[in-house]
Amino acid sequence: MDKAMSEQNNRGIIREINGPIVTITLPGVRNGEQVKIGERGLYGEVITLRGDNAVVQAYESTEGVRPGEPAEALGWPLSVELGPGLLGSIFDGVQRPLEEIFEGHGDHIPRGLSLPALDREKSWHFVPEESLERGTHLESGIRLGTVQETETVEHRVLVPPDRAGELVELAPEGDYTLEDTIGRVRTPDGRTRKLKLYHRWPVRNARPYVKRDHGVAPLITGQRILDTFFPLLKGGKGAVPGPFGAGKTVVQQQIARWSNADIVIYVGCGERGNELVDILETFPTLQDPYSGRKLMERTLLVANTSNMPVVAREASIYVGMTMAEYYRDQGYDVVMLADSTSRWAEALREVSGRLGQMPVEEGYPAYLASRLAAVYERAGRVETGGCDKGSVTLIGAVSPPGGDFSEPVTAHTKEIIQTFWALSKELADARHYPAIDWTGSFSEHVSTAGKWWHKEIDPDWEARRGEALALLARDAELLRIVNLVGPEALSSAQRWELEGAALIKDGVLQQSALDEVDTFSSPEKQFLLLDMALTVYEKGAELIELGVPVQELTDLPLLAKARRAKQVYDSTQTEQLLELMEEFNQSFDKIRTEYAKFEEHAQ
Amino acid sequence: MSAREYRTSSYAQGGLLEVRNTPEVSFGDRVLIRDHMNRIRNGQVIKSSEGSVLIQVFEGTSDIDLESTWVRFLDEPFEISLSPELLGRVFNGIGQPKDGRPPIVSNLRRNISGTAINPAARTYPREFIQTGISTIDGLNSLVRGQKLPIFSASGLPHNRLAAQIVRQAKLVDEESHFSIVFAAMGVSYADARFFQEEFSNSGVLGNVVMYINLADDSPVERLALPRVALTAAEYLAFELDRHVLVVMTDMTNYAEALREVGTAKGDVPSRKGYPGYLYSDLAEIYERSGRIRDRHGSITLVPVVSMPSDDITHPIPDLTGYITEGQIVLSRELHNQGIYPPVHISPSLSRLMKDGIGKDDTREDHPRVANQLFALYARALETRNLASIIGADELSERDRRYLGFADEFDKRFVGQDEDEDRSIIETLNLAWELLSIFPKDALTRVKETDLAKYHHTGD
Ligand SMILES: Nc1ncnc2c1ncn2[C@@H]1O[C@H](COP(=O)(O)OP(=O)(O)OP(=O)(O)O)[C@@H](O)[C@H]1O
Ligand SMILES: [Mg+2]
């Protein structure tokens, strides 16, 4: 034993196993270092040092491990492989390729398995950047060339952050595997270092960029209540909190499907296996509405399902985020969806509990808020080393116990994010989907998004949005009155307001993810539907002012038509929507003239 | 080493036994404990350090004294033997026979904790199971491989409903290819007996494996029971190609046992004293259901969860709802009105319904009919509420129509006989009878083509 220790100093002995927490005598190991545990070679990470003892959290079940077994420190922190071949794949929480594991090892995930994330056999057609010459000084992030990763996504091979230097050699156009050398640089320390199509990066360190930039364009998700009412900018931070079954996952999957992001990274963190399968089975057949290509070509999944080991759950968010930053560095707009950040927080809680750390609120450790903020802080729009702009938009689902938004994870998240899509049990129970509660949700991006909407879609966007929200607010007030004293207490105008608000709710806000037509709504269609609902309301209100009985209006068949429009006309059928609007206008004008005649007659 | 017995127990409380001066024992290993009366108890290592081991004793630690307790480390994980002989048998929570017959002998042994199914190995469940119950088939459809709990409360007929599902579920049709695994934790003798008779009366007993832990059996044993039962279910489903329906009752008793042991271990409590890992622990159980690529069998899981004080936000139903693929919620109000099965549709949900119903599976209008009924019923409940405040007479004609709908719906759609087995088409036709209470323009969640085809109007 002494010999081994003095030779390498990276071998140790297991002292205690307490669930996923293993205490190992491992002198000289660093905090954060990867460790292979026991005869099975389970993977784990050092989280605390106490004298010669390291406290290690294992990413895999420790069943069958006994004190006295050996352990080995590996010398590096948890890192991921970054290179072509990530897209279209599904990885576990520490970036092991699940499809390959299934092919090689069957239905269940064996322990102690170490497989490279990226395929070493596959060759990629590399096209070097023409402008680069020998001797050019390369900053990190400069583009060395490209590889067509999928039909839609061009993979930009960049100088890795730690390889800035003078270009010694760059390979000619041709087919290369990941381990082939595609270039060499001389770094400032005088060493010549190889460049490959991939490199590794430690997940807990944010990847560097030149400078932060602010968001300018909204992320278009095709979901009306998100885009039109509570927009999120590309590079923004959003949260979707809600009780079980309210629709967090559907919101996230809809964004994964229909948003105008270049790359989508979906992290299933402590949630259901079948939800990932749903994506795996449907995305290869679904079309990206922007590129027309299969959605899976721009998508990557990270899966630590609820039955997979808790510690890897904590890691999965960082693994996903690092891959997101990597595509951001290539100048892409990346959306990362994390379902659910609550499970990530619970993993923190579990580990801290086993370490005997002092809990502060509901068992969570004191560092919950700062860790959460640090994760969200990695989102943003930046100027990359390659003088591009790229962004990571981070959208986290939050699963508050009992649906109580005052619990620690929701409360801390709310302070960090810019857009808050609050799901309500009442709306979900009434099958009003997406069950996003317009009174509890907010977006700090409305005016910036407005600039885009005004330029691209309609200068009235912000005004119309405001009018709709005001009508919904009055509706809530009126419903309170009705529930106290009954509908008789309302004036005709007020009753029509209820009708108008109902039209906004049914015809605009409510959007079925399962309806083939309604599942995606282009910005144009979104605005037309909103404008139509408001116009119907306003025209009706004018008539009521003239004295037309409200009953006559609520019986109008056009109300049902306005409610159905969203699923009758798809995003390309804006002409038809305009015609429908014209038809409504005429109906109202007709009532107006008839009523005027009737009045004349009466007098 | 395994033959040696240690008499060095140093602590016993709440199902936990600590032993000192032990050899190096693997985490998760089986242990045999012999007490002063020579009674054998079973345990499992839940913490292992050099020189000391913490054991969870399935039969509990009552009546144990530290002096004269012998502990033997078996140097093997907690495994059970599996063979087709399981069918028709009754076991306790750790897989020992409870029917007076000999234990299962087989070379095939599996660890009860299982290992996580690779998500990439799963295939999405999409085959509709007709249960003959309108509120389930019509509005919260169950599919093969789904985990769909029944949220209930004391005094509500969850057992009768579960039994009706078992009886009527059309997977029973495929005679040789179905099995039932029944897992009872902390249930009364009467309840266990009820199920046993149900199975026997419907002639399926030969296809059932039962794991039973009664209310007066050790709570610690409840921690192993669902894992043992699911290990058997996995074997039947994925090795014998059977469609397995697992009924578990009552998960609340399981979670309480987990809290009891967790508290004794000194685990940091989160909500209501339940340990922070309750979510992951329940998920390890529930996520063992599903379908797997290239395998013929499936595990469909129907756990019964009783909501303490009828509170759906209580950690046990709450965390269950966060893991399962929906829930069937029973309501005391409906029950008190004499409606059976008292399924409250609004908080009920089936997340896997979307792929199991519609044109090729049930009927083309099904998804929209369900959606429309949910919406109308939600509105109708609001109206009912309003009526109770201001009186039904004050309501508008339109509102009164909603009231009438709610009553008819509860009576005719929700309510059905315990032996009434409605086909999905009967359920959908009944739905249209109720929808036709409203004029076409009020039904905007269905298509105009649906209205033309199914709405009962003269025009
Ligand atoms: N936009 C939508 N359109 C149609 N159905 C929806 C929509 N949103 C939610 N649903 C319905 O609600 C169900 C539950 O949604 P979802 O799985 O997203 O809930 P969740 O909030 O993620 O729950 P959990 O916290 O338990 O994971 C879905 O299976 C679907 O039936
Ligand atoms: Mg979800």
Image: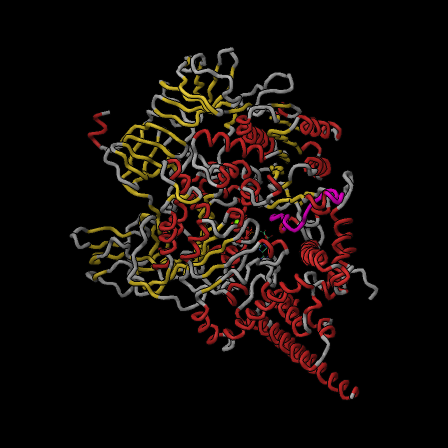
Specify the quadrant of the image occupied by residue A160: bottom left
Residue A354 picture location, percent across and down: 39, 35
Residue closest to the eye, A339 or A133: A339
| x, y percent for residue B167 | 72, 35
Q: How is the image coloured?
A: secondary structure
Instruction: Find out whether residue B350 is within the magenta segment.
Output: yes
Query: Residue B300, position in %: x, y?
Result: 62, 38
Measured as percent of width and height from the top left, residue B346 is found at 65, 51
Identify whether A370 is placed above or below A105: below
**Residue A43 visible at all:** no
Above or below: residue B2 compared with residue B355: above
The residue that appears at 28% across and 32% down in the rendered structure is A53
Placement of B303 over or under A165, stated as above or below? above
Residue at 55% across, 59% down? A436
- Residue A348 left/right relative to B256: left
Horizontal arrangement in the rendering, residue B71 relative to residue A385 (left or right): right
Residue at 79 percent of width and 55 percent of height:
B433
Q: Is residue B99 magenta?
A: no
Furthest residue in direction right, as rendered: B458
Foreground residue, B457 or B46? B46
Q: Which residues are magenta?
A: B336-353
Pick the quarter of the image with the N terminus of chain B.
top left
Residue A68 sits above or below residue A466 on the image = above
How many labels were placed on the picture? 0
Q: Indicate left or right for A287 with A89 as reference.
A: right
Q: Quadrant of the C terminus of chain B?
A: bottom right
Confirm whether residue B361 shows in the render: yes
